């Protein structure tokens, strides 16, 4: 793995991301958060629909000024519901961004320590469509990185569960 005095390697980033256990856990967390937020929103929609159905039954007996106030109230509630949906979507997006930042930091920190320990000068990321279009297999450390990341991750989870 020595080329022109440099010790180089590459990892297939797609393989790392599809085989790193932390990715699977973060994806599951995002799915659960999405389900939770969707259920919260559905509950808000159902509540508004119930209120609207009740108001429709009462509308026939209301004077015009009260009916107009009721219509304005529901228009405002509908706007609040749309705002709530946007806030929930933003909350989910923010959570996903935080999880992605955590993931990439974990990988970058690992690769920095790994390259120092193994004496690598450069570790390229490769996915088949990036700047690295070909590299000899002898420079591929993908599986070693995946295995090491998963071992490190399992050890961290074991330490957390012991506490």
Image (cartoon, helix red, strand yellow):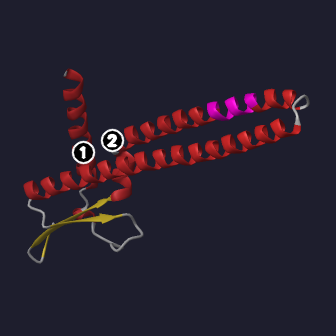
Q: Residue 22 got which mark?
A: 2
The reply, left or right, for residue 155 in relation to residue 68 is: left
Q: Position of residue 82 (x, y in %)?
A: 63, 46
Q: Position of residue 62 (x, y in %)?
A: 87, 31
For residue 6, above or below residue 23: below
Total of numbered circles in the picture? 2
Image-quadrant location for residue 5: bottom left
Q: Nearer the viewer, mark 2 or mark 1?
A: 2
For residue 99, above or below residue 115: above
Q: Residue at x 69, y 31 (%)?
A: 46
Q: Depth check: give the residue in front, 79 or 109.
A: 79
Crowd band around label 1 with a 10 angstrom C-alpha radius: few (<14), some (14–19), many (20+):
many
**Residue most toward the right?**
60
Tell me which label, 2 or 1, sits earlier in the chain. 2
Crowd band around label 2 with a 10 angstrom C-alpha radius: few (<14), some (14–19), many (20+):
some
- Magenta stretch, overall SS: helix
Q: Depth check: give the residue in front, 24 or 3.
A: 24
Find disc 1 in the rendering and name its residue.
149
On-image quarter of the N terminus? bottom left
Badge 1 marks a residue whose secondary structure is helix
Give yes or no for residue 107 being in the magenta stretch.
no
Task: Report if the CB atoms under discs 2 and 1 are less than 8 Å apart.
Answer: yes
What range of the chain is rendered magenta?
Answer: 43-51
On-image quarter of the C terminus? top left
The reply, left or right, for residue 73 in relation to residue 108 is: right
Structural distance between the alpha carbons of marks 2 and 1: 9 Å
Image-quadrant location for residue 25: top left
Q: Residue 81 got which mark?
A: none
């Amino acid at each position: 793995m020595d080329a022109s005095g440099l010790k180089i390697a590459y990892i297939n980033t797609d393989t790392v991301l599809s085989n790193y256990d932390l990715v699977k856990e973060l994806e599951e967390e995002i799915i659960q958060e999405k389900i939770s937020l969707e259920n919260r929103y559905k509950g808000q929609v159902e509540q508004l629909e119930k209120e609207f159905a009740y108001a429709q039954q009462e509308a026939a007996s209301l004077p015009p000024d009260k009916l107009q106030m009721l219509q304005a109230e529901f228009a405002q509630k509908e706007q609040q519901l749309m705002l709530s949906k946007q806030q929930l979507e933003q909350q989910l997006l923010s959570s996903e961004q935080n999880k992605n930042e955590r993931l990439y930091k974990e990988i970058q920190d690992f690769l920095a320590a790994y390259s120092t320990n193994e004496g690598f000068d450069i570790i390229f990321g490769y996915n088949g469509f990036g700047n690295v279009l070909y590299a000899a297999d002898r420079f591929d450390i993908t599986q070693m990185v995946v295995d090491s990341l998963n071992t490190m991750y399992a050890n961290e989870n074991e330490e957390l569960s012991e506490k």
